Amino acid sequence: MTRLQIGIIAASLALFCILAFGLETRPRHLRDLDRQRSISGETTSAAVLLKEARQKLPETAAAEVAVMEDNAQASASDAEKAERFKELSARWYQLGFPAISGYYAQEVAEILNSGESWAIAGTTYAIGQQQADEEKVSEFCTSRAVQCFENAVSLDPDNPEYQLNLANVYVVKPPQDNPMKGILMLRELNNKYPDNVPVLNTLGRLALQTGQTDRAIERLEQALSLAPENNQTLCLLADAYQAAGQSDKSEAFAQRCQSGRE
């Protein structure tokens, strides 16, 4: 058999293997993102969302983030890469893509691995969860927000803010098999930290949303006694007293709420 014949046979076998078993030709980082999606059970992947987001960008913005991404990948150290990822997260947020901003914030957290960095990523995803106009994006952000806040809690278990934010993610999008999970987490936090103003404000807001006006006022007045100038408390009390039909009190709190925003 000649060398030419051997070469033809080898090439044919290689082509057969490609057609029969498939050959992964995507960049490695995109394969990794899809592998993460498979492991976490997400309905979409960061790779897909990144591709779709880039297609929606104006030409100049797309070119800008492409350069920023190249610079991040070319970083000489983890510290430098973290800074580049922070810039990418901020830029994508400015462009109106909190899900992509969250992804890059998560990349920062993977490097720094601090409670604060994971909480920032979780908060960014939580914003994406609330602003998403597609179910797949909402589910992606919900799943990632939970992961990030759980990491933050594991690194700093005594910080109630991280636990509160995790509970809020479940309140916004409850698990189908446990629809009360977020509410129960908030109640546990209230029992553990009875004088925590953000927890009281959250419980007051939820009580107001579900028509429990008296309960809302009770929670919010307690928060007010602990932090008289907390603007969120003042604004919520304006709404609560309005719902209770006490217009004088509502107006007084509304004025204080507005002053706090100026």
Image: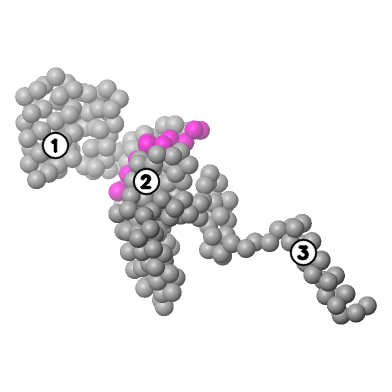
Write the residue at 32% across / 41% down. 189
Lower sequence index among marks 2 and 3? 3
**The image quarter in which residue 110 lies:** bottom left
Location of residue 193 with respect to 158 vertically, above or below: above
**The image quarter in which residue 58 lies:** bottom left
Circles 2 and 1: CB atoms closer than 8 Å: no
Q: Using the image as rendered, state which of residue 3 and residue 26 is in the foreground.
A: 3
| Residue picked out by circle 2 | 128
The crowding category of the residue bearing disc 3, from other C-alpha atoms within 10 Å (few below 14, some 14 to 19, many at least 20), is: few
| Residue picked out by circle 1 | 234
- Which residues are the magenta region? 160-177
Location of residue 183 with respect to 11 vertically, above or below: above
Between circles 2 and 1, the one closer to the viewer is 2
Looking at the image, can residue 34 be seen? yes
Q: Mark 1: which secondary structure?
A: helix
Q: Residue furthest bottom?
A: 3
| Image position, residue 60 (x, y; %) | 35, 60
Can you say which quadrant of the picture contains the N terminus? bottom right
Looking at the image, can residue 188 be seen? no
Residue 32: numbered disc: none
Residue 15: numbered disc: 3
User: Which secondary structure class fits the magenta region best?
Assistant: helix
Q: Is residue 168 magenta?
A: yes
Mark 3 belongs to which amino acid?
Leu
Mark 1 belongs to which amino acid?
Leu
Q: Using the image as rendered, state which of residue 147 and residue 103 is in the foreground.
A: 103
Q: Using the image as rendered, state which of residue 135 and residue 188 is in the foreground.
A: 135
Mark 2 belongs to which amino acid?
Gly
Write the residue at 90% across / 79% down. 2
| Image position, residue 195 (x, y; %) | 22, 41
